[in-house]
């Protein structure tokens, strides 16, 4: 076993051993900062892991706050670990590169928590905000769309599948999905006889524009109404 695997096993073992301690100490109480932000993992299924991680890095966060470390320091550290990970991976040291990526992620989490703990803002995020406003515009909204293979009939029944196309909404929550379902029902859809197919990007775009998907993946055949062409199977 390589040293990196030994370290990984030790970290995972410590993490697993600490989870029952966290459950006993916190007794189901969520991390206040994560709860205030509405942080969620796997649509709420993995929220235990979110609050456990915040609890696990809490001692380090408190030490940094007492030392007066600000969010810009964590930004710089995260950038350094990010650059280091690229160098390590490029030189074939994949395991060390993975650890550098993990440390960069921890720095990113601490960046925000220190900023909120000190009631400060990270200067580095100003550049990100300016670029987003310039490129996307102030009125930009992430859209999550729903497509159907056929319009609902007079009883509100769709005789095919519903396809959900996400576009990377970083704040889509369970409440947001409930609102999406309410919006679909408001369009007259009450019964769906087919399946709910999530984030079928290529299929949804092709169906919306009446296009043909040229592919070698026959799994696309599950999308009712999608036009497919399999060029590798064409006989000359």
Image: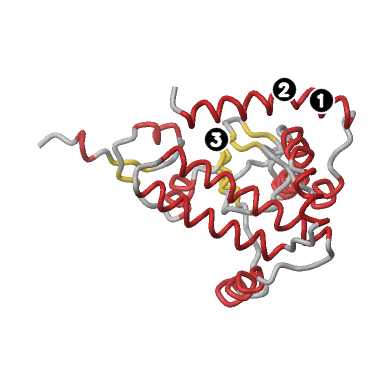
Residue sitting at 45 percent across and 45 percent down? 203
Other residues around mark 1 within 10 Å, as few (<14) / some (14–19) / many (≥20):
few
> Mark 3 or mark 2, which has the lower sequence index?
2
Query: In the visual, does 76 lie left or right of 95?
Result: right
19 vs 34, nearest the viewer: 19
Q: What element carries label 1?
A: helix
- Looking at the rendered structure, the secondary structure element under dot 2 is helix
Q: Please report contact status of discs 3 and 1: CB closer than 8 Å, yes or no.
A: no
The answer to the question of whether label 2 and label 1 lie on touching residues, with beta carbons closer than 8 A, is yes
Pick the front one: 6 or 206: 6
Residue identifier under label 3:
160
From the viewer's perspective, is residue 233 above or below residue 119?
Answer: above
- Disc 1: which residue: 21
Secondary element at image label 3: loop
Mark number, residue 17: 2
CA separation in Å, label 2 and label 1? 7 Å
């Amino acid at each position: 076993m390589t040293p990196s695997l030994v370290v990984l096993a030790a970290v995972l073992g410590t993490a697993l051993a600490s989870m029952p301690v966290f459950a006993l100490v916190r007794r189901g109480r969520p991390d206040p900062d994560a709860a205030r932000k509405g942080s969620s993992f796997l649509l709420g299924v993995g929220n235990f892991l979110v609050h456990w991680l915040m609890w696990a890095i809490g001692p380090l966060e408190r030490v940094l706050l007492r030392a007066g470390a600000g969010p810009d320091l964590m930004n710089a550290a995260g950038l350094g670990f990010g650059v280091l990970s690229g160098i390590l991976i490029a030189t074939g040291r994949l395991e060390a590169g993975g650890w550098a990526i993990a440390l960069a992620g921890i720095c990113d989490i601490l960046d925000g928590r220190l900023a909120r703990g000190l009631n400060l803002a990270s200067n580095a995020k100003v550049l990100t905000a300016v670029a987003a406003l310039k490129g996307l515009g102030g009125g930009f909204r992430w859209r999550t769309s729903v497509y159907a293979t056929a319009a609902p009939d007079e009883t509100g029944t769709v005789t095919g599948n519903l396809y959900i196309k996400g576009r990377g909404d970083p704040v889509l929550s369970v409440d947001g999905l409930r609102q999406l379902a309410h919006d679909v029902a408001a369009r007259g859809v009450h019964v769906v006889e087919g399946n709910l197919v999530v984030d079928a990007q290529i299929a949804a775009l092709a169906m919306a524009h009446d296009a043909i998907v040229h592919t070698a993946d026959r799994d696309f055949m599950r999308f009712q109404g999608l036009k497919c062409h399999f060029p590798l199977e064409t006989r000359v």
